[in-house]
Image: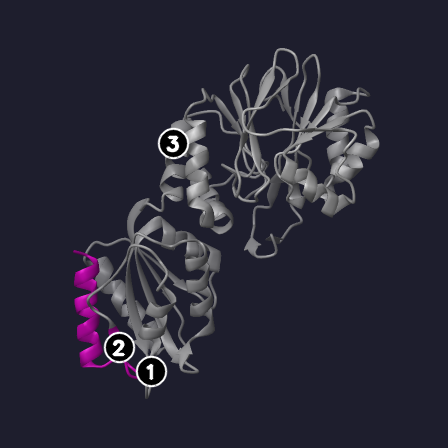
Amino acid sequence: MNITKDIRYIGVNDHDIDLFEGQYIVPNGMAYNSYAIIDGKTAVIDTVDVRFRDEWFGNIKAVLGNKAPDYLVVHHMEPDHAGNIAAFMDAYKTTTIVSSAKAFAMMQNFFGTDYEDRRVVVAEGDTLSLGEHTLTFVTAPMVHWPEVIVSYDSKDKVLFSADGFGKFGANDVEDPEGWACEARRYYIGIVGKYGAQVQSLLKKAAKLDIAIICPTHGPVLTEDLGYYLDLYNTWSSYGVESAGITVAYTSVYGHTKEAVQLLVKKLEAKGCHVKVFDLARDDMAEAVEAAFQYGKLVLATTTYNAEIFPFMHTFITHLTERNFQNRTVALIENGSWMPNAAKVMRGLFEKSKNLTFTDTTVTIKSALNAASKAQLDALASELCK
């Protein structure tokens, strides 16, 4: 696939993977993107997952023939992008590898060599001339590893953005939900903790005249780039993307679930948009995504071993590890003899910034009664003000 006259796509699609990074369900597979720039000198941009070595080498040969690339540019050392560095450097013994100092230290860890005699170390503002094309390197530490760099081709106005602007899904599978849904789940799950670092990179990118974004996952972005940039700005500043309420719950014998179902009816009757997740059964990454997408979150769980039900504990940990902030949180607790869940949940958020807890906390003692139903009425009114 031609990105521009001189830039070709040489990546691969993975339809065998079930869990990305060992935890994220990817029903539409994954893409591992790699590119080639053909100029006076040629550069291969990133490698792919080691399982696709033969296919990737075939893609390189289809574009370059028997010519050895002059450079291999490595933006990020995560194995899904860097897994074939050693094989590539063995196959092309005259190629020079270009990356950051921290990346070369990681190559030593992964491959037992840092290619000291065949490398160019680049830092912020350094350039690599290929002829008509010149790559300018921009450091992007913790987006989402410390060694990450991105590069900008001034001729074709292309940003090679590493994991930035990536999404779940193979590139040969049409996503009926569009780009944002799986890009949001990808961003929140993998990069969400590092909003400040993404904001820093966006400020650098704002100074560039970008026409095309080439990420290491997902489709090449060529139109309406402002849409993608605006979403990334919202996500990385922990802003509210859409008006709505996420309700996440666990229920042992069904009574907490009954309370959630009643609350949802009340919220929807008042015109509020609601997404509901059973944390024991639904994809937790989807629930985390929704919690960051909307401005209000309801958590409902039981007191369990004097703490809270494990799935809820895990869910809150996922939120706080990703700097969950700037949201309104409501709590529903259930306990037969000593309801304690609301106190525990609130405590788990003690280091989170700019969270507002609703005035109403719903307490259920085993099953709903007139008092707890009245609390649900009050909570629905408060959330749908």
Instruction: For marks 2 and 3, give the CA distance.
Output: 42 Å
Question: Taking 292 as reference, is 161 above or below it?
Answer: above
CB contact under 8 Å: marks 2 and 3: no
Evaluate whether residue 250 shows in this view: yes
CB contact under 8 Å: marks 2 and 1: yes
Evaluate whether residue 253 shows in this view: no
Q: Which residues are magenta?
A: 362-385
The picture quadrant where one finds residue 87 is top right
Residue at label 2?
363
User: Does the magenta portion include 364?
Assistant: yes
The residue under the point 57% across, 44% down is: 145
SS under mark 2: strand
The residue under the point 48% across, 56% down is: 285
The picture quadrant where one finds residue 64 is top right
Residue at label 1?
335
Instruction: For marks 3 and 1, give the CA distance.
Output: 46 Å
Please state the horizontal and vertical placement of residue 296, each as a whole percent of the image: 29, 56
Residue at label 3?
227
CA neighbours of label 2 inside 10 A, class few (<14), some (14 to 19), many (20+): many
* Amino acid found under the numbered disc labelled 3: Tyr
The residue under the point 57% across, 57% down is: 23
User: Does the magenta portion include 142?
Assistant: no
Comes first in the chain, label 3 or label 1: 3
Comes first in the chain, label 2 or label 3: 3
Judged from this view, the residue extending furthest toward the bottom is: 337
Comes first in the chain, label 2 or label 1: 1
* Amino acid found under the numbered disc labelled 2: Thr
Task: Pick the residue in front: 170 or 289.
Answer: 289
Please state the horizontal and vertical placement of residue 47, each as a whole percent of the image: 69, 35
Task: Pick the residue in front: 345 or 333.
Answer: 345
SS under mark 3: helix
Task: Pick the residue in front: 331 or 58.
Answer: 331
